[in-house]
Image (spheres, grey):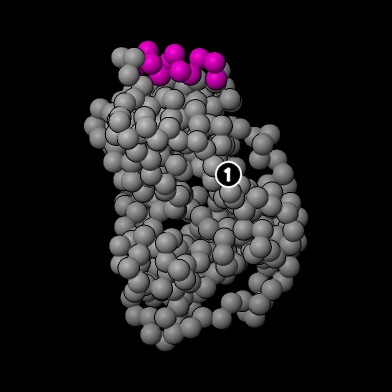
Amino acid sequence: MSTMRAAVLTAPKRFELRDVPVPAIGPEDVLVRVARTGICGTDIHIFNGHYAADKLPLIPGHEFCGTIAERGSNVRHLAVGTRVVVDINIGCGTCFWCRRNEVLNCTEVTQVGIGRDGAFTEFVAVPARLAIAVDAAIPDAVLALTEPVACVIRAARKARVEFGQSVVIFGAGPVGNLHVQMMRLVGAAPIIVADLSAERCRMALDAGADAAVSDPAELKATVLGMTGGRGADVVIESVGNRKLYEQAFGLTRRGGHVAFFGITPPGETVPVDILRTVLEEGSLKGSVAGMGEDMHDALTLLSHGRFRTNDFTKAHYSLDTIQEAFETLGARPQDLKTQIAIAA
């Protein structure tokens, strides 16, 4: 096969279905036949023209699974037909940041589906070292959640959440729900979620949150009431809203931590009270993508059923209806994840 069907984002909010060349692979690469690809919040930002607009036209899609269709001449550890997930962060592999598993800081980094063509298509070429073999009999719809689960694993690591720490999570969408489940796994308590959607707040409670607040006017009182008046140990912003980032600092306790996770438009800033941060030993840490061992750990947790995934695997669209899938996302709050089924 020399061509493949692909959903090419040619301009903000406009996909075109095209027959494009199947990507060539080098001796250290593999060609992955894509089975299932999830729509990520980052994909929505790209679709709306808020992120990576300079990369268009682009085939987005980075939450995917598939099978090895072809391998490069130097690849020995992956056989054709092997099911895989892929670490999408491609760095040089040798620099200071790559050695520390901080690949996004590599000066040569690119990401599948963000900086280069991704998985809303039939085949993707990736470095073989980033393809992870899957031994367990996990359904494709669950396997395609490996990358977003890796993201919340990394966020938990960066925030250094400890047993019994209180956590506030802004956003009860797909990634917010996964943050709830991750915080429950690491022993955080209480877990408080804030989201304007009452439906998604209900789903957050089902996922393990101790409280879910849909009225912004009630949030601070709820947080103080559930933390002995101190404020939260950790606040995670997973929406990408500047005002919520500002609000996050007002919800942390003395010595608390704000986890920067949600992506905002370029150049947006928030004021930080320097004196308070210094005197109270507050902190903040950014995190956005899972990489390296985060991906392996995500696969392990999913393999052993540590995440509730039913609400993430209900909505699937075909590649031919991808435009509709993106345009109707806002009207389907009950669908925590929408996936594009590529291969049967």
- Which quadrant, please, contains the N terminus? bottom right
Q: Tell me the quarter of the picture where residue 233 sits.
A: top left
Given residues 53 and 339, the one toward you in this image is 53
Please give the name of the residue rendered at 36% of the width and 48% of the height, measured from the top-left corner: 154
Which stretch is magenta? 216-227
- The residue to which callout 1 is attached is 268
Q: Is residue 326 visible?
A: yes
Q: Tell me the quarter of the picture where residue 211 sits.
A: top left
* Place of residue 340 in the rendered image (x, y in percent of width and height, measured from the top left): 61, 53
* Place of residue 125 in the rendered image (x, y in percent of width and height, measured from the top left): 52, 73
Residue 20 shown left or right of residue 189 in the figure: right
* Place of residue 278 in the rendered image (x, y in percent of width and height, measured from the top left): 32, 35
Please tell me whether residue 166 belongs to the stretch shown in magenta: no
Please tell me whether residue 223 belongs to the stretch shown in magenta: yes
Please give the name of the residue rendered at 40% of the width and 35% of the height, measured from the top-left corner: 274
The type of residue carrying mark 1 is Glu
* Place of residue 185 in the rendered image (x, y in percent of width and height, measured from the top left): 30, 36
Residue 11 shown left or right of residue 241 in the figure: right
- Which quadrant, please, contains the C terminus? bottom right
Please give the name of the residue rendered at 58% of the width and 44% of the height, measured from the top-left corner: 268
Given residues 340 and 279, the one toward you in this image is 279
Given residues 227 and 164, the one toward you in this image is 227
Main SS type for the magenta part?
A: helix
